[in-house]
Amino acid sequence: MAEDKIIQDLLPQKFGKWGKIWTAALVVVCLIGAFAYYRQLRYGLVVTAMRDYVSWGIYISNFVFFVAISLVGSLITAIFRLAGVKWGSPLTRIAEIIAVAAIIFAAIIIIVDMGSPERFYFLFTHGRIQSPIIWDVIVITTYFFISILLLYYPLLPDMKILLRFRERSGEGLHKFYKFIGSFWQGTAAQFRLSEKAINMLCIAIIPVAFTIHTVTSWLFATTYRPGWDSTNFGAYFIAGAFLVGAGAVVVAMYVFRKAYHLEKYITESHFEKMGRILVLLAMLYLYFNVNEFLTPFFKMKESEAAYLNGLFSGDFSAVFWFAILTGMIVPTIILLFKKGRKPLPVMISGILVIIGAWFKRYLIVTPTLLHPFLPMHDVPASYRHYYPSWEEWAITMGSLAGTLLVITILVRIFPIIPIQETIIEQHETGK
């Protein structure tokens, strides 16, 4: 494939009609979320349905979901690069962009949950190292900067190419490319230095990513409550994060492949391989779910009986079985068959995984908070149940739309598939 043809195929494209409609729709949802947050700032957290017992609600569910999605950066980028998995090259940029967008909104939703945003500043000025919350702040901040660098360094060789196509990018973007990448000359010394920096980041981001999910799980597990009092939570969170991260990548692969006609670069072989990875991760996460619930189910301690009954056959049973079936079992059944690992079925499986993962995070938070060790006595009826207010739903949907908007903007600015890496690989394979 000619070098010029690869460049023309992979250069960022301007939004067409549907791209503008999509972006406008996301902006509208974000604005509705911003209005709901304004109401929360003005009137306080009383506008939410959170009370003394359910003091976290869907905000923290959303936080755990975003943190899980962000692990995709270390799964696809770091592990594939370090393991020398060449077929994963077209997917690395997609994974890096998703990781950056997700970790941004993981931090934002925590600020939203605090009520008064200035409290976030106090975490840095009055944080106590004895608290798992400050551990979370440290590792998320570290992960954010490593993710930014892991997106930026592989972009540098593409900057030189993008600077040659002023008419395609527009004057504004051309100035931006010049600002962030004009120093890149493409010399052998720069390539060696860049490769070394990327490898160091790949090595660093894996333990940091594992630490994020372990520390997040500790926020729950160090609290002596039914459903959270578990030594399995760290591995349980990591397995779930790998699954939903991979699900996000396959959905993005399909959308970008269709929207930008990248069939030559994101091939059916990529979906076949990612489908196999999804099966492995879904079965691994299913194992941890069985491990998480089977042992306490057999023990059936009095403190956990109401919680478990609520999940398996009570108020939360419909959501629980929906999350298990949608997020793990159905995708596994689809992807076990060769025809199920074609692009469309893999994309559908990825969507099911993401939906199931969001509801699974909701179930991690809410049922436990509604089953405290000390039984509820003489409290208003609203304290015994939790139904998110419209403000909570609007802010949650706004944060999800904001993540998609960041991804949309980044793929408009930067090539979805690394151009320089693709050219080098084409030369090496002689295609």
Image: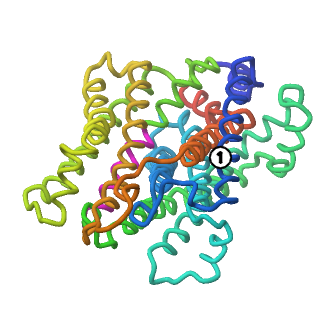
Start and end of the magenta stretch?
A: 231-246
Q: Is residue 42 left or right of residue 226?
A: right
- Inspect this view and state whether residue 412 appears: yes
| Mark 1 residue element | helix
Q: Position of residue 278 (x, y in %)?
A: 35, 36
Q: Position of residue 147 (x, y in %)?
A: 59, 55
Instruction: Indicate whether 291 appears above or below 413.
Output: below
Name the residue located 68 percent from the left edge and 50 percent from the top edge: 152
Q: Position of residue 132 (x, y in %)?
A: 44, 74
Q: Position of residue 430 (x, y in %)?
A: 57, 24
Name the residue located 26 percent from the left edge and 60 percent from the top edge: 227
Q: Is residue 317 left or right of residue 387?
A: left
Q: Residues within 10 Å of mark 1 (few under 14, many from 20)?
A: many
Residue furthest to the left: 298
The answer to if 339 sits in the magenta stretch is no
- Residue under label 1: 154
Q: Quadrant of the C terminus?
A: top right
- In the image, what residue type sits under mark 1? Pro
Q: Quadrant of the N terminus?
A: top right
Name the residue located 48 percent from the left edge and 37 percent from the top edge: 248
Instruction: Indicate whether 318 appears above or below 262.
Output: below
Instruction: Indicate whether 112 appears above or below 163.
Output: below
